[in-house]
Image: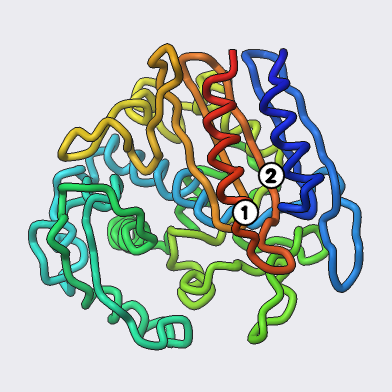
């Protein structure tokens, strides 16, 4: 296994101080190269990063948790991609928005919520459901947390349990992800940002909307380890067989353009990209500094876990992250 360019970028990101530490794994068929480097915490104490620590996955929750739940409901014919979301969320006033728009980020939901991060859960729910649809509905991709918050509420309506319990029952437990949870141990968690309101955030979700909504958010909140995400990636690639979650055949739909306007760059929840030989990859990132890249056809994956928001968000990381993704996808 030779991914020298990819590994050099990761090493440079760490040495340039773009994140305190990094846990990453490169999977290439049956070979796995796994490394843990740097610090878990910079302040108030310097703590070395060790194996098996749980990271706040941030928006990877969408694709590791909520997408498989929605796919399960579709496969069991309890939900249809072209159902209007009003069918499940009658408070929503626009009949044109469908499940497909939420899961491909083509809903173009717009509007400003005053004091959003300080609202009570019920008030935040009402405010989100009172947002409107913009002029670019079903015309362009606009990545938004609200799409997956709504998808979580729709799954709750069908299943009668919270979206986070659904993810635990339908995805985490069947796949045997023993250290993936919405209720991590503070001792075993990598800390994220230090804020004026919350101090050092450790073992609690960083995302402010999910912090308010709790178990009723399908947009963030999941914590996991490098080893568990290796198992998840192997399942998506077909190396770990488990039809109990979603059938292997249906997983192929993750590598196909699902956008209404056929933009070729979004599947079910995932960013869809292609390497220099036009082989599809799926990619997703998380605000806290997490990245997951998978090619089912090439049996290749990069799992990258960092806490680039500790002690505060690092913007240079975002530029270098894009270079890392492009390099890994195209490295021969």
Q: Is residue 111 above or below residue 153?
A: below
Circle 2 sits in a helix, a strand or a loop, which is it? Answer: loop
Q: Position of residue 272 (x, y in %)?
A: 38, 33
Q: Nearer the viewer, residue 307 or 316?
A: 316
Residue sitting at 40 percent across and 22 percent down?
Answer: 280
Q: CA distance from mark 2 to mark 1?
A: 33 Å
The quadrant in which residue 35 appears is top right
Residue sitting at 61 percent across and 48 percent down?
Answer: 290
Question: In this rendering, would 295 be left or right of 147?
Answer: right
Q: Is residue 8 above or below residue 275?
A: below
Q: Position of residue 267 (x, y in %)?
A: 32, 35
Question: In this rendering, would 41 be left or right of 7?
Answer: right
Q: Residue furthest left?
A: 95
Q: Nearer the viewer, residue 243 or 20?
A: 20
Q: Position of residue 95 (x, y in %)?
A: 8, 61
Which circle, 2 or 1, is nearer the viewer?
A: 1
Q: Position of residue 186 (x, y in %)?
A: 77, 66
Circles 2 and 1: CB atoms closer than 8 Å: no
Residue sitting at 49 percent across and 67 percent down?
Answer: 215
Question: In this rendering, would 30 be left or right of 100?
Answer: right
- Residue at which label 2 appears: 178
Which quarter shows the N terminus? top right
The quadrant in which residue 29 appears is top right
The circle drawn on residue 316 is: 1
Sequence order check, earlier mark of 2 and 1: 2
Give the crowd class for mark 1: few <14, some 14-19, many >=20 residues within 10 Å: some
The quadrant in which residue 260 appears is top left
Circle 1 sits in a helix, a strand or a loop, which is it? Answer: helix
């Amino acid at each position: 296994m030779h991914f020298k360019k990819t590994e050099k970028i990761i090493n440079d990101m760490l040495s340039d101080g773009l994140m305190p530490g990094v846990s990453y794994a490169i999977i290439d068929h049956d070979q796995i190269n796994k490394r843990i480097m740097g610090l878990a915490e910079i302040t108030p104490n310097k703590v070395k990063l060790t194996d098996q620590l749980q990271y706040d996955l941030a928006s990877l929750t969408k694709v590791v948790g909520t997408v498989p739940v929605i796919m399960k409901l579709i496969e069991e014919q309890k939900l249809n991609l072209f159902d209007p979301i009003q069918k499940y969320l009658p408070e929503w006033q626009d009949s044109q928005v469908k499940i497909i728009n939420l899961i491909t980020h083509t809903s173009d939901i717009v509007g400003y919520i005053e004091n959003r991060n300080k609202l009570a859960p019920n008030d935040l729910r009402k405010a989100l459901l009172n947002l409107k649809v913009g002029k670019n509905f079903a015309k362009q991709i606009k990545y938004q947390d609200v799409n997956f918050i709504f998808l979580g509420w729709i799954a709750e309506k069908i299943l009668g349990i919270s979206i986070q319990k659904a993810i635990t029952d339908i995805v985490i437990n069947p796949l045997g992800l023993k250290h993936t949870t919405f209720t991590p141990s503070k001792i075993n968690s990598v800390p994220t940002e230090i804020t004026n309101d919350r101090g050092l955030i450790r073992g609690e979700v960083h995302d402010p909307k999910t912090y308010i909504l709790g178990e009723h958010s399908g947009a963030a909140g999941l914590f996991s380890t490098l080893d568990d995400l290796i198992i998840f990636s192997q399942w998506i690639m077909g190396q770990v067989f488990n039809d109990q979650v979603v059938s292997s055949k249906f997983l192929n739909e993750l590598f196909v353009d699902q956008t209404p306007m056929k933009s070729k760059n979004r599947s079910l929840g995932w960013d869809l990209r292609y390497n220099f030989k036009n082989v599809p990859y799926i990619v997703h990132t998380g605000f806290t500094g997490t990245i997951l890249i998978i090619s089912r056809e090439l049996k290749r994956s990069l799992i990258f876990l960092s806490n680039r928001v500790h002690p505060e968000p690092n913007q240079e990381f975002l530029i270098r992250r894009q270079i890392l993704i492009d390099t890994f996808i195209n490295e021969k």
